Image: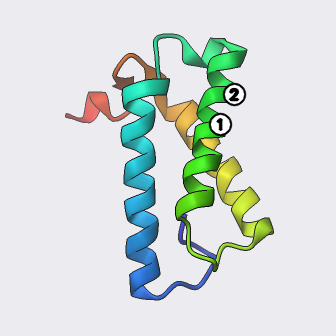
Amino acid sequence: MTRPVPELAEKERAQVKKVCKELLETLKAEKLVLDWRKKDRARSDVRRTLEIVFDRGLPESYDEGIYNEKCELAFHHIFTSYYGAGESVYSAMR
């Protein structure tokens, strides 16, 4: 979310980390249900939640182009890494 662009001050970088943590907590608690990736509505809910959280919380350094790019990259990461019902590629690492 912070590389290669935009250039961020340390305070902005902390803000981005906080927003990403909030997003993941929200998604895990409410949106990443069993088989969410197979259901159009569930995928749309995840994408929309991501956009809302980023729109509210990311610093102004994220112009429209960067915002759209980061939303796409974040959704792709969530889609490929989080299977739903508490399962993710990170579950195996514990």
Name the residue furthest left.
Answer: 94
Do the numbered discs 1 and 2 sit on residues whose CB atoms are within 8 Å?
yes
- How many circles with numbers are drawn on the protein? 2
The image shows residue 19, relative to residue 58, as above or below, that is: above
Name the residue furthest bottom.
Answer: 9
6 and 56: which is toward the camera: 56
Decide if residue 88 is in sight here. Answer: no
The image shows residue 63, relative to residue 55, as above or below, that is: below
67 and 60: which is toward the camera: 60
Q: Give me the residue at 44% from left, 20% from top.
A: 84
Q: Which residue is mark 1?
A: 47
Q: Which residue is mark 2?
A: 44
Name the amino acid type tagged 1.
Answer: Arg
Q: Position of residue 65 (x, y in %)?
A: 80, 67
Name the residue furthest right.
Answer: 65
30 horizontally vs 67: left or right: left
Mark linked to residue 81: none
23 horizontally vs 21: left or right: right
Q: Position of residue 13 (x, y in %)?
A: 44, 76
Q: Give me the residue at 67% from left, 52% from top.
A: 71
